[in-house]
Image: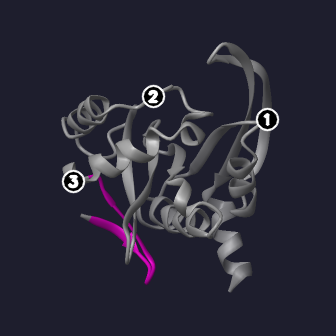
Amino acid sequence: MILLASPLLSLRHFEHDDLDAFTRYRQDPAVARYQSWEYFTRPQAELLFEQMNEIPFGTPDNWFQIAIEHAESGMVGDFGLHFVDDYQVELGITLDPKWQGKGIAKSALNLLLTYLFDHLKKHRVYAVTDIRNHGSYRLFESAGFRREGCFLENCFLKGEWCSEYLYALLASEWEVRNIVGK
């Protein structure tokens, strides 16, 4: 089911047929570098898919994957959405390295924000990103997110202490951004 689309991209619910592409790009060491996994397997993808389909989309305190589909090339990435409660959503984005640096992530993020704020009427959307992941935090900054904080050495990941930035965007900021941008 398509959630929102532009001429180039669509955001849609995850389908079982997505699991091969999903597993392939998540196995790339460059993709896994700032993630919790070392190596992502097809059985892990199957389990994630099964767990997501056990509960209704958007159920508070649960994570869901949304496919990012390119009009000509199929699935090129995904969003992880954590519906924290009825008002807030935490998000993460993973993009196939072949599609990075082409404006796909920013376009997809703008579509997602339109869906979350304009359709689902969420109050706040936020993301946490490793401070070494320059592409990730630049994406959020370019989309109008505010850096709300920096957590110094707050997580132990892959044998080292890592620091993270917290970015957020309020519905009121999204609305102002869209009025000013028109």
Q: In the figure, 92 relative to 70: above or below?
A: above
Residue drawn where x is 77% and y is 36% of the image = 131
Q: Residues within 10 Å of mark 1 (few under 14, many from 20)?
A: few
Mark nearest the camera among 1 and 2 is 2
Query: Secondary structure under badge 1?
Result: strand
- Mark found first going from the N terminus, 1 or 2: 2
Q: Which residue is mark 1?
A: 149
**Residue 147 appears at what percent x and percent y?**
78, 45
Tell which of 124 and 10 is nearer to you: 10
Q: Quadrant of residue 179?
A: bottom right
**Residue 35 appears at what percent x and percent y?**
56, 32
Circle number at residue 17? 3
Q: In the figure, 169 relative to 23: above or below?
A: below
Q: Is residue 145 left or right of residue 86?
A: right
- Residue extent of the magenta highlight: 2-14
Tell which of 70 and 129 is nearer to you: 70
Q: Residues within 10 Å of mark 3 (few under 14, many from 20)?
A: few
Q: Which residue is mark 2?
A: 39
Which quarter of the rendered picture does the C terminus lie within? bottom right
Give me the C-alpha separation between circle 3 and circle 2. 20 Å
Q: Are marks 1 and 2 in contact (CB under 8 Å)?
A: no
Tell which of 93 and 117 is nearer to you: 93
* 114 magenta-colored: no
Q: Quadrant of residue 46?
A: top left
> Could you tell me the amino acid type at mark 3?
Asp
| Residue 81 visible within the image | no
Which quarter of the rendered picture does the N terminus lie within? bottom left
> Could you tell me the amino acid type at mark 2?
Tyr
Residue drawn where x is 18% and y is 35% of the image = 54
Give me the C-alpha separation between circle 1 and circle 2. 29 Å
Q: Residues within 10 Å of mark 2 (few under 14, many from 20)?
A: some
**Residue 64 appears at what percent x and percent y?**
36, 42
